[in-house]
Each structure stands twice: as C-alpha cells, then as structure tokens.
Image (cartoon, grey):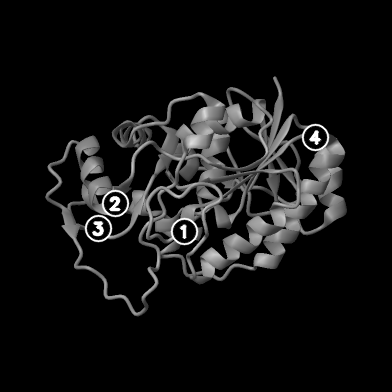
Amino acid sequence: MDKLLIVGADTMLGANLALALRNRWQVVLLGGDETPMLDGCLSSVCDLSDCRDTSYRVLVESPRAIVHCSRLATSGWDMLTANEPIDTQELIQQALSLASAAEQAGCPLTVLTTDAIFSGPRMFHCEPAPATANHSMAEAAKTFERAMAKTPALIVRTHAYGWSPVGAPQGFAETAWENLNGSIGCPVDAQNYCTPILATDLAPLVCKAIELNLRGVYHLTGAERTNQYRFAAEMAVACGLTGRQVLLEPPKRRTSNRPFMDETSLNTGMARRDLRMPLPMLREGLARFADQANNGFRDTLRSAYRAVKGHQHAA
C-alpha cells in the first residue's frame, strides 16, 4: 500500500481527508504537537518551521505523495466567522519547506486552499479569474497561493465542510447541524453563495488528481451553487426535520461598493475535463454528512487525542 503524508490533520479538512483515505493509503500525519492521532493513521511529529527537520521526516517516510492542509484551506463561509490571526509568512515558509522536501524525495505535493479569495460579482469563477476579495483572510490566501505557484505543487481551491477534529473550531455546517437538531433556531444568510463539497467526497478527487500528476491550480468542489439558506434547508431534510428552525437573517448593510464575500462559487470545468469524475450533488453530500453523525465517523474525530512530542508512528 502506498504511503500518503498529510500535513494539517489538526484542521477539519486535513483530518477528514486522513480518515477518508486510510483504507486506500498508508496515511501518516506529519505535524507538531497539535496534530491529533487518528484511528487507522500513523503520526510523525515534526517541527514544520525547521526546513531540515521537515526534509528529514519526509525522506524517512518516503511517501508516494504529500497533501498539505493549512488554516488557509478554510472555506469562505467559515472564514466569515474566523477571528484568530494567521501568521501568513510562517505558513508560507512551512509550505515552501515542504515543497522543497517533496522535490528532494521525488513525490508530488498537493496544497489545499480556499474559495474565499473570490467575492463576485460574477458566478462560477474559473482558475485564472481575478481574485477580488479584499478581506484579511483572502489577502493571506492570495499571498500564500502566489508563493506556492513558484513550486511544482498542485494547488486545489475548494469549499469543504465536515466534522471537526478535537481542538479545531466548528464550521458553519457543524454549527447548523447542532442548531437544527437542538431545535434552537438556525440563523442563516441568503446573500453568500458557494459550491460546497463534503470533505470526504473531496478525497477521491484529490487522489485522482495525484494519480494523474496534475500541476497548477484546479477547482475541486461540489456540483451545485447554493447559499446558506438552501444548504441549511437541505440539511434539515437529511436530518428528517421540517426545516422550520431555519431562520433567514435580514440582508446585511454593505459599508463599501465592493462585495465582502457574496459569491465564491467555483467553476470546475477544467477539473471535470481532466479527472473525468462526477462531482457530488448537494443533497448527496449532506446525506453522507448526516450518516457520519451516526456511523462512528464523527466520534472518531472527536475522540482523537493529541500527539506526544517525540513520539513517532503511533497507530
């Protein structure tokens, strides 16, 4: 079985990809003390800010491929509520060190980023479309992408949702689920549109891209454009609820002529052409998200514990 190195298992996207791919690859989670130890995956503690340590760990593991998920892979909707500062330069340095290590090891690197660099007004942004969002998280993501574009990495923009691992903040989807099932009301915004995809549905698409040795920027998302109102209403259906808890918020007043993040939907034409794989419909992904709440998948993420410094290859 080929080995896959995943960096960023402390993020929602990284942890979900690891669990989704553990039966297809020998998954090794590379990271610092914050990296959770997930059932069915191995862990290797590494100082990602140390280029030599990163190179050493990658060469020791000798993976078939590397997938990098930083906090800049957070979806546009979840970035709307993110309030923790991001050290962009540190993330860039870590990713560049990883790219250098991947090149030395002769394996491809896939870097996940976000749809939050877009803001409209057009729908379905293609890969070379102008990144018009001007909020701080978007600027950080754009700076990160420019740095990674100088490497041979595959850059995947997406809008992924899923269950969060221990220690990671809840995203919009998880919060909406708890509000709906708690019958406490689920306030949503009908202004912000995107093309969401369940994180575990993204996994086989990333695998196919790795197998095809794709390079450059690709958009990998769900097949449908939707707003939070429809997303929550479809989630209510997946929960077996009526959707009466979905509460539409009044339109937000804009303080600028430029939209904040109204339209981050991604055009996936290039990915569909090259991967030749179907993209999941919204209702399909939400049905699987609902199943994960009951089949042990969510519990595996929530029961994970943190890696111990210096401890290697703990299953």
- Quickly name the residue at label 2: 227
Mark 3–mark 4 Cα distance, whole angstroms, equals 46 Å
Kindly check if marks 2 and 3 are in contact, taking CB atoms under 8 A apart as contact: yes
Vertical position of residue 36 compared to residue 288: above or below: below
SS of the residue under disc 2 = strand
Taking the spot 71% from the left edge, 33% from the top edge, the residue there is 65
- The residue closer to the viewer here, 151 or 37, is 151
Viewer can see residue 32? no
Q: Amino acid at mark 3?
A: Ala
Q: Amino acid at mark 2?
A: Asn
Q: Quadrant of the N terminus?
A: top right
SS of the residue under disc 3 = loop
Taking the spot 74% from the left edge, 29% from the top edge, the residue there is 64
Q: Earlier in the sequence, mark 4 or mark 1?
A: 4
- Quickly name the residue at label 4: 61
Q: Earlier in the sequence, mark 3 or mark 1?
A: 1
Q: Residues within 10 Å of mark 1 (few under 14, many from 20)?
A: many
Of tags 3 and 4, the one toward the viewer is: 3
Report x, y in % for residue 216. Answer: 66, 43
- Quickly name the residue at label 3: 190
Q: Amino acid at mark 4?
A: Glu
